[in-house]
């Protein structure tokens, strides 16, 4: 290199007017680029929000009516001659009595004109099929009522409920309401015997084929039991794995391989975990079908990589100076981890765990594989009793032919969304509460 | 590795006149394939302040971290050589590193109090090493350590508050209090004032001078004035080699090696 070599292009000094104008032109372009980027970002966020509003909005419009239900108030005379003619007081005799007939008599008292079989059937069709069982349970619980006339409130049939909500017209082929029924309903309405109330059945009952008495309690309890198992297995395992990989494991080809596989595991389709659970837990270990225990095991396999990845990120975020300070004080490695690293990374780990749990709460496919799709009419009593979970209940209800299940499916979706929101809010709360500054 | 003997003159190491606390002989250190220390022979005198000076990357901090085996935490670091604390080889398998670090405390470049209360910061060492017999004994240790670190008056009424809420200089004195709470024999300081303002620095320097009665101190510093102010002995490192070690006054006024002369007069580094 010599002096005569080409001189590099030196920018003219800013003081020159031409140079200033050039910079000003470029400045305008730079601002334009920034404005474009901001517009695109805003657009992306708006689209996302629009979809969210659309989803929640449609579910709200469809689901909210399901939180209300129609009830009919009627006076039933608990005729001893029909319930317990010999006055034995034996629960078996009382339980076997014909309550359908009692209910019919009560309705006939109000509509003496209904004499032929079809009209009698129409009258009974106004109230829920399960009303007779409710009546029986009431008498069994309190046999002293026999002989009295009691006023009870029973859910109306789902078609009546839909008719009252204006969801079906009389002419509809779906609306299996006879002219006599429509007339009777108008009269009952005029009496004030028909009224709309909060649909508590949705939260205190379990699955049922009758929409008016179908509820989510069984599914909610099933979901909770399943999540308890998932959390109990995935959280300690995930935290231990994250701590070991970050703090203790040597960095070599094996740990690299493990890391890649954990990341892959997080991307495995959930149905595969279901098949694994079917083959391993049900077939090989002979665990009970449809049980929250098995569901929790399968979901913990799925939540594990999420918790490990979040845990490792949280540990990495602890400043190395804290680690050095502890080691420099003569703390052993396990003391460094338990006194400093774990408390400082716990908010991040908890957030990861709750997000993993929220993911597990919404999971359906693997649970179908292990039989949690069964129709379970009882609230699960424990970890090994048959159960279903909220998303599977939604799947089941979406499949039922009755019109009234359309609303209830949306109501179930809203309930699931509320649970998810609660879990995410807990994650944010925990992060804020335990977050420490250094 | 190229033999350095022909290229470099032998290090000039003036013998200590007092008792030796730490004796390093032939210390070599590699980070992976890169050698960071070459045959370092250095004595650290008891109840003295020894300053390690030299340009960035010369290996002075690396050497300091060999003395309490903090380099063990770096998977690629490999140490060969002999470092003796009161005649005991600290790299022998019989030495427990946790016990060693209780004897050789360390103060880091950036103040790094734990995100716990001031009290818990100082009490941490005595707690993990089981030094306090009772709660009141622990209280005494905490108070005494904070007094020694010149921090007691400032924090006496707010011990339960977080240590991270103190100012930078106070945090560093808290770290010194934390280190002396376990009554170590040696305190290593790795540029303890580089993140502090001149007033806080002056307080720490005073403190170092006070501490020398009870502790042996080795301090890494980039500030030649600081080395001149606080130390009795100075060692000059360059490119992983110990160039010269001797009484501080001599190093700064009449160094024997040309490279030391160039560095202390500000011609390079």
Image (cartoon, coloured by chain):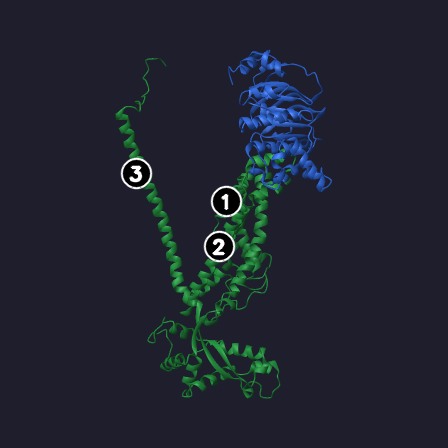
Earlier sequence position, callout 1 versus callout 2: 1
For image coordinates 49% across by 61% down, the residue present is: A390
Can you see residue B63?
A: no
Earlier sequence position, callout 2 versus callout 3: 3
| Percent x, y of residue B34 | 55, 24
- Which secondary structure lies at badge 2? helix
2 and 3 marks in contact (CB < 8 Å): no
Q: Quadrant of residue A57?
A: bottom left
Question: Which of the two discs, 1 and 2, sits closer to the camera?
Answer: 1
Viewer-nearest residue: A147 or B28: A147
The relative height of residue A278 versus residue A255 in the rendered view (above or below) is: below
Viewer-nearest residue: B254 or B119: B119
| Percent x, y of residue A326 | 62, 36
| Percent x, y of residue A286 | 60, 59
3D distance between C-alphas at marks 3 and 1: 40 Å
The residue tagged 3 is: A32
Can you see residue A179?
A: yes
Q: Residues within 10 Å of mark 2 (few under 14, many from 20)?
A: some
The residue tagged 1 is: A263
Image quadrant occupied by the N terminus of chain B: top right
Q: Chain of mark 2?
A: A
For image coordinates 58% across by 64% down, the residue present is: A385
The residue tagged 2 is: A271
Q: Residues within 10 Å of mark 1 (few under 14, many from 20)?
A: some
- Which secondary structure lies at badge 1? helix
Give the chain coloured blue: B
């Amino acid at each position: 290199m010599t002096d005569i070599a080409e001189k590099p292009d030196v920018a003219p000094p800013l003081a020159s007017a031409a140079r200033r104008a050039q910079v000003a032109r470029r400045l305008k372009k730079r601002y334009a680029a920034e404005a474009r980027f901001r517009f695109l970002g805003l657009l992306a966020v708006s689209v996302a929000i629009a979809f969210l509003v659309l989803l929640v909005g449609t579910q709200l419009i469809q689901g909210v009516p399901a939180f209300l239900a129609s009830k009919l108030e009627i006076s039933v005379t608990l005729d001893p001659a029909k319930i317990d003619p010999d006055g034995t007081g034996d629960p078996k005799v009382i339980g076997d009595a014909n309550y359908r007939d009692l209910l019919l008599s009560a309705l006939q008292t109000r509509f003496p004109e209904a004499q032929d079989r079809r009209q009698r059937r129409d009258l009974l069709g106004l109230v829920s099929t399960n009303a007779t069982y409710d009546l029986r349970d009431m008498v069994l619980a309190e046999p002293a009522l026999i002989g009295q006339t009691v006023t009870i409130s029973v859910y109306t049939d789902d078609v009546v409920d839909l008719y009252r909500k204006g969801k079906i017209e009389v002419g509809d082929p779906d609306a299996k309401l006879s002219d006599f029924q429509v007339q009777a309903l108008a009269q009952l309405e005029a009496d004030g015997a028909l009224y709309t109330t909060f649909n508590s059945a949705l939260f205190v009952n379990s699955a049922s084929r009758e929409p008016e008495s179908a509820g989510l309690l069984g599914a909610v309890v099933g979901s909770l039991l399943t999540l308890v198992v998932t959390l109990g297995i995935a959280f300690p395992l995930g935290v231990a794995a994250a701590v070991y990989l970050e703090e203790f494991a040597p960095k070599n080809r094996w740990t690299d391989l493990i890391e890649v596989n954990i990341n892959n595991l997080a991307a495995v389709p959930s149905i595969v975990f279901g098949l694994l659970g079917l083959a391993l837990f049900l077939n090989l270990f002979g665990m009970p079908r449809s049980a929250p225990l098995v569901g929790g095991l399968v979901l913990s396999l799925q939540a594990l990589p999420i918790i490990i990845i979040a845990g490792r990120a949280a540990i990495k975020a602890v400043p190395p100076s804290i680690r050095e300070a502890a080691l420099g004080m003569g703390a052993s490695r396990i003391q460094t981890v338990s006194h400093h690293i774990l408390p400082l990374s716990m908010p991040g780990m908890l957030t990861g765990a709750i997000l993993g749990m929220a993911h597990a709460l919404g999971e359906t496919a693997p649970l179908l594989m292990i039989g949690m799709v069964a129709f379970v009419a009882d609230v699960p009593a424990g970890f090994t009793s048959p159960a279903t979970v909220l998303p599977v209940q939604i799947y089941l209800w979406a499949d039922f032919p009755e019109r009234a299940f359309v609303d209830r499916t949306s109501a179930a979706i809203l309930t699931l969304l509320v649970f998810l929101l609660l879990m995410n809010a807990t994650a944010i709360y925990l992060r804020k509460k335990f977050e420490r500054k250094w | 590795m190229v033999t350095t003997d022909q290229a470099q003159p032998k290090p000039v190491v003036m013998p200590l006149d007092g008792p030796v606390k730490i004796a390093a002989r032939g210390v070599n250190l590699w980070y992976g394939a890169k050698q960071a220390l070459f045959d370092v022979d250095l004595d650290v005198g008891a109840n003295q302040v020894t300053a390690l000076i030299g340009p960035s990357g010369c290996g002075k901090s690396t050497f300091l971290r060999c003395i309490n085996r903090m380099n063990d935490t770096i998977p690629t670091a490999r140490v060969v050589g002999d470092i003796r604390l009161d005649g005991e080889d600290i790299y022998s398998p019989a030495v427990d590193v946790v016990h060693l670090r209780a004897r050789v405390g360390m103060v880091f470049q950036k103040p790094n109090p734990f995100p716990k209360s001031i009290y818990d910061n100082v009490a941490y060492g005595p707690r993990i090493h089981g030094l306090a017999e009772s709660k009141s004994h622990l209280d005494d240790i905490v108070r005494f350590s904070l007094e020694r670190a010149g921090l007691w008056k400032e924090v006496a009424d707010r011990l339960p508050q977080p240590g991270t809420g103190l100012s930078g200089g106070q945090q560093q004195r808290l770290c010194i209090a934390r280190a002396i709470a376990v009554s170590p024999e040696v305190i290593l300081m790795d540029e303890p004032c580089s993140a502090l303002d001149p007033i806080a620095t002056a307080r720490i320097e005073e403190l170092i001078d006070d501490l020398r009665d009870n502790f042996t101190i080795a301090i890494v510093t980039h500030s030649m004035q600081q080395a001149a102010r606080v130390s009795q002995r100075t060692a000059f490192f360059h490119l992983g080699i110990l160039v010269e070690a001797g009484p501080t006054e001599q190093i700064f006024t009449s160094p024997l090696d040309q490279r030391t002369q160039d560095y202390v007069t500000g011609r390079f580094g």
